Amino acid sequence: MTGIAGILGPTGSDVTSRLSVILDSMKDRGSNPRTMVVDGNDRVIAIGLCSHENEPSRMISPEEGSMVADGIVPASLELEDVGGETDGRSLSDAVRTSRPFANLAISAGKLLALRDTVGQKPLYFGTGPGGTVAVASLKTPLARIGIQHPQPVPPGKLVSLGNAE
């Protein structure tokens, strides 16, 4: 089982080291971490995953779009198309699969978190010190970076973090 995580914070914040703390806290999900960082005008977004050496995992390069997944993401899901939907409406029309998955993506300066419609793969998010927002497969790693009460990403919902203020 792969562990996935993402973090968004203001420019100059310690986003990459906080992501490392989260991924290190999920070593039971894999000791092979990979990360990707996207710098914006006023914020930095980083996503990553930890998987076991021989376990298939999905991480897409910045040229193709920035995404990490735990499970099998439906081929019909076009994240760029749903990236503009910031109201968290159900994506059950786009995600019609019985397969478990959790997905994180970077789109239009936002961190997007999505779970399968049944909620078989765990995914939590919350806000930490300095307005940093993070998402992870497990609650405990979020607590290690100061997020006190992480909330689950609702099954079948897209949570869009980092909307323009």
Image: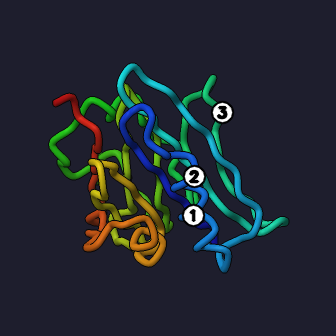
Give the side of residue 112 with respect to residue 74, left or right. Answer: left
The residue positioned 71% from the left and 71% from the top of the image is 30
> Residue 139 at x, y = what percent?
40, 75
N-terminal label among 2 and 3: 2
Asked which secondary structure carries label 3, the reply is loop
Disc 2 and disc 1 in contact, CB within 8 angstroms: yes
> Residue 80 at x, y = what percent?
41, 29
The residue tagged 1 is 21
Compared to 125, does 93 lie above or below?
Answer: above
Compared to 87, does 23 lie above or below?
Answer: below
Q: How is the image coloured?
A: rainbow
Question: Mark 2 to mark 1: distance in Å?
Answer: 6 Å
The residue tagged 2 is 17
Which mark lies nearer to you, 2 or 3?
2
Q: Residue furthest top?
A: 41
N-terminal label among 1 and 3: 1
